[in-house]
Image (tube, coloured by chain):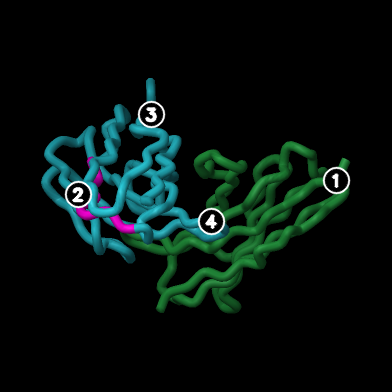
Chain colours: A green, B cyan
Amino acid sequence: QKEVEQNSGPLSVPEGAIASLNCTYSDRGSQSFFWYRQYSGKSPELIMFIYSNGDKEDGRFTAQLNKASQYVSLLIRDSQPSDSATYLCAGGGNYQLIWGAGTKLIIKP
Amino acid sequence: NAGVTQTPKFRILKIGQSMTLQCAQDMNHNYMYWYRQDPGMGLKLIYYSVGAGITDKGEVPNGYNVSRSTTEDFPLRLELAAPSQTSVYFCASTTGSGEKLFFGSGTQLSVL
């Protein structure tokens, strides 16, 4: 069974520090990987996507993909209280994504 | 530009009742999806469609049906509601496989 695993947290990080979120996946055929942020009671919104091995940076966010080790990570620099949310990792190919259960991130002022 | 519109936002059903969750998008996306999200869990794919007239099952299709008669609309039908169908339902659309998903605001459904 295809799975995406995430630590459910909560992960507590001081404001201004780096938050590191991790995700592993079982399907070696997965081609694309996504990080979505979900505030409580809201729908998911895309933060980052990555297709190739290595790092991809967008502002305060960096996504990292290692296909050999089957893991994806998201780094959030200069964490802000507004970053407090659940972060969902998803991976897949073709028409379907497999979603992790999410990591709850709490940024402490 | 409304994006993805889902109705209703909240609904309480009695066991055995039926209902249709509506989803419409105005972005001319071919790909549309229905997900359910149980508390503390990720999204589970119920059904998806890659274009008008084409639908296929996802991971958890039992107890649900869909249709896609137009590019814009992708309704989800619940027949004979059961307590196990209590969940938050999200409709999403995208331009193609591997692209950003645009989500509706969700429907909180309780079956009692």
Q: Position of residue A28 (x, y in %)?
A: 45, 76
- Which amino acid type is shown beneath numbered disc 4? Pro
Q: Are marks 2 and 3 on the same chain?
A: yes
Say which quarter of the image contains residue A103: bottom right
The answer to whether the residues at label 2 and label 3 have Cβ atoms under 8 Å apart is: no
- Which amino acid type is shown beneath numbered disc 1? Lys
Figure label count: 4
Q: Earlier in the sequence, mark 4 or mark 3?
A: 3
Q: Is residue A70 visible?
A: yes
Q: Are marks 2 and 4 on the same chain?
A: yes
Callout 4 secondary element: loop
Residue A13 sits above or below residue A101 on the image: above
Q: Earlier in the sequence, mark 2 or mark 4?
A: 4
According to the picture, the residue beneath numbered tag 1 turns out to be A108
Say which quarter of the image contains residue A29: bottom left
Dot 2: chain letter? B
According to the picture, the residue beneath numbered tag 3 turns out to be B3
Residue A20 sits above or below residue B74 on the image: below
Mark sitting on residue B66: 2
According to the picture, the residue beneath numbered tag 4 turns out to be B39
Q: Position of residue B14 (x, y in %)?
A: 31, 48
Dot 3: chain letter? B
How far apart, in angstroms, are the residues tagged by discs 1 and 3?
A: 33 Å
